[in-house]
Image (tube, rainbow, N blue to C red):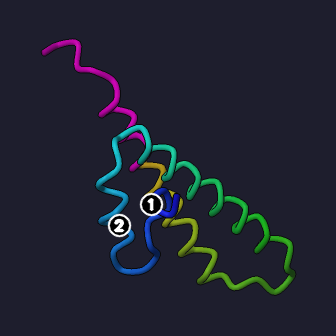
Amino acid sequence: MSDLHPPEGPGEDEAANELNPAARLLKVQEEHRALDQEIAALYDFPYRDQLQLQRLKKKKLQLKDLIERLKDELIPDLNA
């Protein structure tokens, strides 16, 4: 059952690319939700790290764009 969880580290992106589009979409959506929770947790601190907050928001936007591209891959092109 350890094959379900790719090893973490530099090869993590390569393992994610090997997943089918639906599985990859679910994985990226999960990462997006985790970032959202992390960003919300940072807002709870009165002296939050603005640079870290900016980086997390940027990564969250990148994941959102990736989610949209993956959704587009799953929907067949009707004009073809």
Image side of residue 36 versus residue 32, left or right: right
x and y percentages locating residue 78 in the rendered image: 23, 13
Asked if the residue under mark 1 is in contact with the one under mark 2, i.e. CB atoms within 8 Å, the reply is: no
Side (left or right) of 21 relative to 59: left
Residue of label 2: 13
Q: Quadrant of residue 68?
A: top left
Of residues 48 and 80, the one nearer the viewer is: 80
Amino acid at pointer 2: Asp
Horizontal side of residue 29 vs 41, given as left or right: left
Mark closest to the chain's N terminus, 2 or 1: 1
Few, some or many C-alpha atoms within 10 Å of disc 2 (few <14, some 14-19, many ≥20)? Answer: few
Question: Which residue is depicted at the point 42% across and 80% down?
Answer: 9
Residue bounds of the magenta highlight: 66-80
Amino acid on which the number 1 mark rests in the picture: Asp
The image quadrant of residue 15 is bottom left
Real-space Cα separation, disc 2 to disc 1, in angstroms: 15 Å
Q: Which mark is residue 57?
A: none
Q: Where does the image place residue 80, in percent across and percent down from the top left?
A: 12, 15
User: Residue drawn at (48%, 50%), measured in percent from left and top?
Assistant: 64
Q: Position of residue 76 (x, y in %)?
A: 27, 20
Out of 27 and 66, give the one closest to the viewer.
27
